[in-house]
Image (spheres, grey):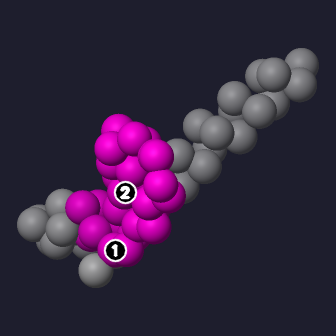
Amino acid sequence: MLIIPVKDGESIERALKKYKRKFDKTGVVRKLRARQQFIKPSVTKRIKMSRAIYKQALIEKEEA
């Protein structure tokens, strides 16, 4: 359970924003979506590698 301390006079919108940020950091939604469908470990590794290659290409492109 997430506990968000709210200070006196703090708006509800700000408290909701804190809650949403904290909830996103826990990764609950990502885990649930990942468990809906099984993906082979080799496929996840391939996706991870392709993302790393893409990021590296962007970094090299900025440096050049």
Can you tell which mark lies on residue 20?
A: none
Label 2: element kind: helix
Front-most of 3 and 10? 10
Q: In terms of image quadrants, where is residue 13?
A: top left
Front-most of 41 and 3? 3
Q: Which residues are magenta?
A: 2-31
Can you tell which mark lies on residue 2?
A: 1
In the rendered image, the residue lying farthest to the bottom is: 1
From the image, tell me which residue sits under label 2: 19
Amino acid at circle 2: Tyr
Residue 44 is left or right of residue 29, and the answer is right
Q: Are marks 1 and 2 in contact (CB under 8 Å)?
A: yes
Q: In terms of image quadrants, where is residue 46?
A: bottom left
Residue at point 89%, 19% (across, down): 64
Q: CA distance from mark 1 to mark 2?
A: 8 Å
Within 10 Å of disc 2 (Cα), the crowding (few <14, some 14-19, many 20+) is: some
Residue at point 18%, 61% (across, down): 33
Residue 41 is left or right of residue 57, and the answer is left
In this rendering, the answer to whether 55 lies above or below 45 is above
* Sequence order check, earlier mark of 1 and 2: 1
- Looking at the image, can residue 43 be seen? no
* Dominant SS type (magenta): helix
